[in-house]
Image (cartoon, rainbow, N blue to C red):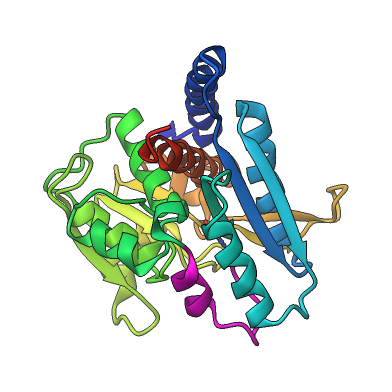
């Protein structure tokens, strides 16, 4: 079994991006500026957003974190989105999800200028993704694809089963893996809460991707010998042995599944760091596409 080390892979990508930024700086060119908007105090969202801002600093990007109380109105948030859309200094921005219940996430996502939508969540970018046209790919699926590419994992003609049909991961990833691209050209089955015989379907997977946010959902009896297993789960569970009192848990029962796999991602240190690397790649591209 080979561990798909997202942490090291993302560090390599960050190094490559850092070099590109140094080169731009040495020529007196603009450096990318990413803005992250965080609404409320959810611990998980705060951790992710802070990691994104830290990655920017490490690479040499400019970054800004805008925080709002969870009582912010939808209009106030939309006004901020509109002002970021027209701010020439900002190359890309993200609104961390989920948002409080009184705010319509789709309305906010649709308000973002697709050219600055470095999360790749805008319907225009998702449409381009489906048609294999240029646009921003959603960060987590793009990170998974990059991980498969860098480990030279063959995907063509493979049976791929995705568990979970979220707009952020499962749905776009199932499409990306089915496209006529490399990595891609898989025969994809997208499973979800209404799927019958899910265990049986998973057992047929050469590549199994778990993205449902249910700790330990994938057990050894659901995995074919030699399968590639990608764990997108990052649920916080209590852990009194940790200083923070919690740890991250994936959707895959790692200890029993790992021994059956050819490749597997750990949690943490697998998909998570790759998401951040993809966001950085998208942000640099957003700036380059402006022709500056
Ligand atoms: N919430 C969970 N993952 C993501 C992500 O990649 N981007 C944003 N904006 N919110 C998220």
Question: Residue 174, percent across and down?
Answer: 28, 61
Q: Say above or below: 117 vs 292.
A: below
From the viewer's side, name the closer residue of 107 and 195. Answer: 107
Give the tally of numbered discs.
Answer: 0
Q: Quadrant of residue 57?
A: top right
Left or right of 234 on screen, residue 125: left
Left or right of 67 on screen, residue 243: right
Q: Quadrant of residue 245?
A: bottom right
Q: Quadrant of the N terminus?
A: top left
Question: Residue 161, percent across and down?
Answer: 28, 61
Question: Residue 50, percent across and down?
Answer: 71, 47
> Would residue 203 be visible to someone looking at this image?
no
Q: Quadrant of residue 168?
A: bottom left
Left or right of 287 on screen, residue 39: right
> Would residue 133 be visible to someone looking at this image?
yes
Q: Quadrant of ligand 1?
A: bottom right
Q: Residue at x 29, y 78 (%)?
A: 197
Q: Quadrant of the C terminus?
A: top left
From the viewer's side, name the closer residue of 3 and 285. Answer: 285
Q: Is residue 107 magenta?
A: yes
Q: Residue at x 53, y 74 (%)?
A: 108
Left or right of 101 on screen, residue 153: left
From the viewer's side, name the closer residue of 219 and 171. Answer: 171
Question: Residue 128, percent across and down?
Answer: 24, 58
Give the extent of the magenta segment.
96-112
Q: Is residue 268 magenta?
A: no
């Amino acid at each position: 079994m080979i561990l798909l080390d997202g942490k090291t892979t993302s560090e390599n990508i960050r190094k490559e991006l850092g070099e590109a930024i140094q080169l731009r700086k040495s020529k007196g060119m603009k450096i990318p500026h990413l803005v992250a908007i965080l609404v409320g105090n959810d611990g998980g969202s705060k951790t992710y957003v802070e990691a994104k801002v830290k990655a920017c600093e490490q690479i040499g990007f400019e970054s800004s974190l805008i925080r709002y109380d969870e009582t912010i109105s939808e209009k106030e948030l939309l006004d901020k989105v509109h002002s970021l859309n027209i701010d020439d200094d900002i190359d890309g921005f993200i609104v961390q999800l989920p948002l409080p219940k009184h705010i319509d996430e789709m309305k906010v996502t649709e308000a973002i200028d697709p050219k600055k939508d470095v999360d790749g969540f805008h319907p225009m970018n998702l449409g381009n993704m489906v048609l294999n046209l240029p646009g921003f790919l959603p960060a987590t699926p793009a990170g998974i694809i990059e991980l498969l590419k860098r480990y030279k994992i063959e995907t063509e003609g493979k049976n791929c089963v995705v568990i979970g049909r979220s707009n952020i991961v499962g749905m776009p990833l199932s499409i990306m893996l089915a496209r006529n691209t490399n990595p891609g050209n898989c025969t994809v089955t997208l499973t979800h809460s209404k799927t019958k015989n899910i265990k049986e379907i998973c057992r047929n997977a050469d590549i199994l991707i778990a993205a449902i946010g249910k700790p330990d959902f994938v057990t050894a009896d659901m995995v074919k010998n030699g399968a590639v297993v990608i764990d997108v789960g990052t649920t916080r569970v209590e852990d009194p042995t940790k200083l923070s009192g919690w740890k991250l848990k994936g959707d895959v029962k790692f200890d029993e599944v790992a021994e059956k796999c050819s490749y597997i991602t750990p949690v943490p240190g697998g998909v998570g760091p790759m998401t951040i690397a993809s966001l950085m790649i998208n942000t640099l591209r957003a700036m380059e596409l402006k022709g500056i």
